[in-house]
Image (tube, coloured by chain):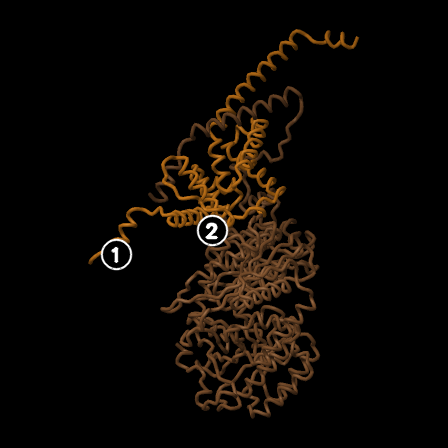
Chain colours: A brown, B orange
Amino acid sequence: MDLDDILALAETRPSPLELARARRVARAAQSRHDLSLAEGYKIMVDTALVDPLTWDVDEATRVARAAQLAKLGTITWVAGGRDGLGRIHWSDEMAMIFGQAPGTLRLTPETLFGLVHPADAERVRRAVRTAWTRCRPGEVGFRVVQPGGSIRHVHCHLEITTREGGPSGIIVTGEDVTALELARQERRRLAIRSQMLGADLAVLDGLTGLPNRGYVIDEVDRARRTTGGALVVVATEPATRLPDALTDADRDRLTASVARLLRTVVGNDVTAGLVGSGLWGVLLAPADGRTEAAESLAARIVETFRNHLFGIRQNTLRLNTSAGVVRFGSGVLATGFDLLVDGEHAARDARRDTASVVVLDQPVADGERTARCRSRVRHAVSASRFALYAQPIVDLNLHQVTRHEILLRVRSDTGEPVAPVAFLDMAERVGEILAVDKWVVHHALEFIGRGAQTSHYQVNISGKSLADPGLLTFVTEAIDRYGVKPERLTFEITETALIENRNEALAFARGIRAAGCHLALDDFGTGYGALAHLKYLPVDLVKIDGTFIVDLCRSPADQAVVSKLVELCQTLGIRVAAEYVQDDATVEHLKSYGVDFAQGYWTGRPEPITVSQDAVQTVELELRFPPQHTALG
Amino acid sequence: MIEFEGTAALTPEQADCEATREAEAARMKAAHDQEFAAFTEASYHQVERILRSACRDREVVEDALNEAYLHGRVQWSKLRVHDRPIGWIIVTARHKIRKDRQRHLREAAMAPEDLPTAPHSNIADVWEAQELLRGWLHRLPARHAEVFQMAQEGFSNQEIARILGLTENSVRSYKVAARRGLRELAEEAGYVAPDSHRRQGASRGPR
């Protein structure tokens, strides 16, 4: 079946339904007509009674008249004439569309095109020329600039008039379509917007699919402002030391399987998230309508986790598990973060006392909590419960590893190095991050200074620490002490916390660059990294946050953000790095945008570097940076 | 007294005349009624199909048809001598639709790109064929759709040009463009002539 068959089928005599409708319309017209006669009123007919089929005028007049009825403007151009330019004339409606008083303008083709928006004039000329030379109708949309400077959207049909068998001119029928055009643009914008609007990836932990720490803290915060409730924090820790042969990927798989198990225990309707390394938060609000008390849920989770054998590589592993429960009423002053810390402390207490669950009936007093957090951080620093890792960074122009970022890992109670997110968050919030940053700078520079300094090293410093006036001296002294080449150092300012003191931050930034080091903004695009920082901070490198990169190949919104950010940075003289780069396809995108550096599992996972002075090791061993072949796969 | 004089003034002849005139008028009206009814029955489906080819809103079309035919009845004594009264009906109904549209700015609220395309189904009867065709016509420019539907209803190029207020040159172009557009839409929806299938098959087959 094709178009002709369908046309043949559709083209028929009137159907019974159509005939019925015809009779109904005829009867209605008849009876209303009769009624008007009987009651002596007149039905006004506003259409001229000329027979359209026999009206004897030339084509242009006829079309112009129809347009006038339809409240459309017309421009008539008749070819020929003495100068060969023809005669041109517009209707009053058309003059008004162009914002001119009818009859005031002597119209020539040139004055007419002069009224069209300069950007559209050439297109209009072309449309007219095409219609005339090919002798067929056309249409064109354009903007006119009215005398007051306001701009209107106009749409016109161009038609060729014929006289004595040959083309005799053009008649243009047009109307002001500004309202339609704006509505169309708005529709298009909304369509783009909804297409570009992505899920908030930043709230989900990439590995486990569970909400991340920030999300859980926000949810707890909401609960304490509304219903109150209880927060369960579960701490898990391998019962035996993990074999050194385990890679990061193995650890990730373990975390993911714990997350799955947690989901099956608590169900899908409860807010449960990964709130730190080996730390899981479950929020119970009374509004959930759960009958199960927080305490028994906590006990159930601990029980299940303790009894579960987790598979890792070919081995099985048990997790030492304990839980803390904090109950909180509605309107408590403790924030979501505070409650989470209380829960974590309760879980630690439970582990220390070899209990399953420790329950707090109310949040801990502020002073007590802060003091405990501070002492934890200080203890960690003084006992050097940290490890430094290095992750290779690939220069995308050279396609080789030219840099390394020095990353911090915190040792857990069993000595296991874990990601420091929760620890750093806590340290930042209780104002102890400076000590951690100083530890990192000290040990990282010591390590770098002892090596051959063939790479370029990027060291993290919290935005909060910049407020300390002593930091700059501390850093420059460490550079001198360990003989580090300053041009081989970049300090990355992480902005999970606000830059606390602009003036000090600026002083540090200028000082560190005067010393010859570079400055980078980390996690740019999320958190507090404002565009203003690019303007006033002497930044050399911007590291685009990984949330824009992980889904880059599929997300047009991410592509837009990254490509435009690169453009902006290039304009400002700033180099760009991308984090969380996982595959070749992403790298191709990044290269096409002109991103300078890539970092992520594609370049290589972080590997431990040795910094301990106590363990005497050879220089070669210390310089065990990830080899380049793993970096480039 | 005036009444009396008035009555006295009526001569039997005059009264006779009056009665004849009235009878004549009544007979004329009856004849026009009949004529109009026949005209409506013969023309309605054509006008409706033409209007609906360019206007999506069925109710608007119905309203316009009701008004156009009412006006047609009111002016039937003049319309009946037109070449084809259907032309005037179409002009009037289109005018009414246009006024309605200007009042409600319907087009701003509902744009072609927002509308779902007609669902593909097997064409079993006339009604389905018409609906399918109408769906495609709505995706063409309004001028193309109207010109095409009028041509389908048997109007000549000149008649179409005069009724729609276009030049004849345009009508010729629009007709060709409409057919091309429809063919594309039909092929897009999977209605391809069997012989073109065969051609494709042949080019892929063994030589």
How many angstroms separate mark 2 from mark 1 (CA)? 44 Å
Query: Within 10 Å of the Cα at label 2, are there few (<14), some (14-19), or many (20+) other Cα atoms?
Result: few
Work out which residue is located at the far left of the displayed protein and give it.
B207
> Is residue A80 in view?
no
The picture places residue A1, in percent across and down from the top left corner, at 33, 43
- Is A421 in front, or is A279? A279
**How many numbered marks have been drawn onto this rendered protein structure?**
2
Work out which residue is located at the far right of the displayed protein and give it.
B1
Residue drawn where x is 62% and y is 21% of the image: A35
Residue for badge 1: B203
Q: Quadrant of residue A444?
A: bottom right
Labels 2 and 1 touching (C-beta < 8 A): no
Is the same chain shared between marks 2 and 1? no
Indicate whether A220 appears above or below B63: below
The picture places residue A23, in percent across and down from the top left corner, at 50, 25
The picture places residue A370, in percent across and down from the top left corner, at 67, 70
> Is residue B178 in view?
yes
Indicate whether A487 appears above or below A412: below
Indicate whether B173 appears above or below A16: below
Residue drawn where x is 39% and y is 35% of the image: B126
Residue for badge 2: A166
- Is A461 in front, or is A443? A443
Three-letter code, disc 1: Ser
